[in-house]
Amino acid sequence: METLEKSAEIVSNLIQLNNDRVDGFEKALEDLGEGDADLKSLFEFYSQQSRRFSQELSAVGAQSGADTDTGNSVSGTLHRAWIDVKAVFTGHDREAILNECERGEDVIKKAYKEALTENNLTPAALQVVSAQAQEINQAHDRIKALRDSQ
């Protein structure tokens, strides 16, 4: 019973973080310039990816009683507000946007890693979270490489 409750809590947290990720990439899309078509398509892809992740987590979470209507986390909302404030001072340049995106990817990557190492997921949740973690790690590495190339 305890594993089921912990699994539901972890899944709910990951849903929130994916919702934050969607909003973060959509905010970054607003800040990109006309010469950033490559980032626009990438950020749209990652936004869609997190929508898919939330749906997959919601499906598996419903089996364990997870709150699948979680909205966004407080920290995600604060992070987006910080991006707005920071943009006033640094402008909307490519490197600054990639820095903020990498920071967001660090957060979600860490959450997936913790979810997998706690050994509290149901088998169905473990399967979904493991597959998503691989994609999250790839996305993080891609954003980091783009940022480093600036």
Image (tube, grey):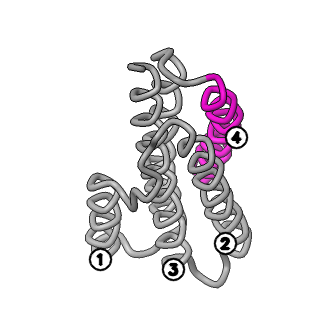
Q: Nearer the viewer, residue 1 or 50?
A: 1
| Mark 1 element type | helix
| Mark 4 element type | helix
State the residue position of label 1: 88
**Numbered label attached to residue 135:** 4
**Numbered label attached to residue 67:** none
State the residue position of label 2: 40
At label 4, counting other C-alpha atoms closer than 10 Å, the crowd grade (few under 14, some 14-19, many 20 or more) is: some
Q: CA distance from mark 1 to mark 3?
A: 14 Å
Instruction: Give the magenta range.
Output: 123-150
Mark positioned earlier in the residue sequence (4 or 3): 3
Look at discs 4 and 3 and give the one toward the viewer: 4
Residue at (62, 48) in percent of width and height: 59
Q: Residue type at mark 3: give it.
A: Glu
Q: Quadrant of residue 63?
A: top right
The quadrant of the rendering that contains the C terminus is bottom right
Left or right for 75, reference 17: left
